Image (cartoon, rainbow, N blue to C red):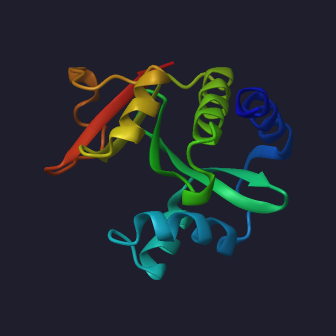
Amino acid sequence: MNVSSSPQKRQSTRRTVKISHHLNYPLNHIENVLLPLFEKDYTDDSLRVTIDSANHIWCAYENGKCIGCALITDIGSYGGLYVILFGISKPAQGRGIGTRLLKKIIKWSRKHSYTFIYLLTEYDNEKAIRLYEKAGFEKDFRESFLDEELPGYGDGVVPLILFV
């Protein structure tokens, strides 16, 4: 019984989760997703500043509730995007929502002629690294023409890039 109900559940999730892109999401919707995920790095105030700095915000909603967000900004003169924060609320993780959100962002980036998407994640966040690599992002890249344009990072962080 579990084998046959699993595809139905996944199909049902695809129908009820809506992913969109704009800048007019209610602030508390974004905070409710991202603050619990990044509370060791952000306060309420610093998260609001980060949200305000995003040129592009993507959100995934299920039954009217925000369950995933991506904060993205334009970067550099080579037409790139920097994913400032990307997260799916803990109860919604493991259902393919992060993959769908990332695929929508990549598709939109190609349509709008961006050349790359860059992001940073913690080196021990294996689930996130797998998600990004599955979507085509690469670790350990070396593109000298981008060195001065990409945000810096410290220890414990893995930079990833996808050329679109």
In this image, 25 relative to 32: left or right? right
- Give the residue at x 59% y 64%: 33
Q: Where is residue 164 in the image (x, y as percent from the top left)?
A: 51, 18
Q: For residue 111, which quarter of the picture?
A: top right
In the image, residue 102 sits, relative to residue 145, either above or below, namely: below
Q: Position of residue 94 (x, y in %)?
A: 56, 43
In this image, 25 relative to 134: left or right? right
Q: Position of residue 34 (x, y in %)?
A: 52, 64
In the image, residue 41 sits, relative to residue 120, either above or below, namely: below
**Residue 97 or 50: which is nearer the viewer?**
97
**Residue 144 or 3: which is nearer the viewer?**
3
Q: For residue 67, which quarter of the picture?
A: bottom right
- Give the residue at x 84% y 38%: 12
Q: Residue at the far front: name it.
A: 1
In the image, residue 108 sits, relative to residue 143, either above or below, namely: below
Q: How many labels does the image show?
A: 0
- Give the residue at x 68% y 68%: 29
Quarter of the picture holding the N terminus: top right
Q: Where is residue 143 in the image (x, y as percent from the top left)?
A: 25, 20
In this image, 163 relative to 160: left or right? right
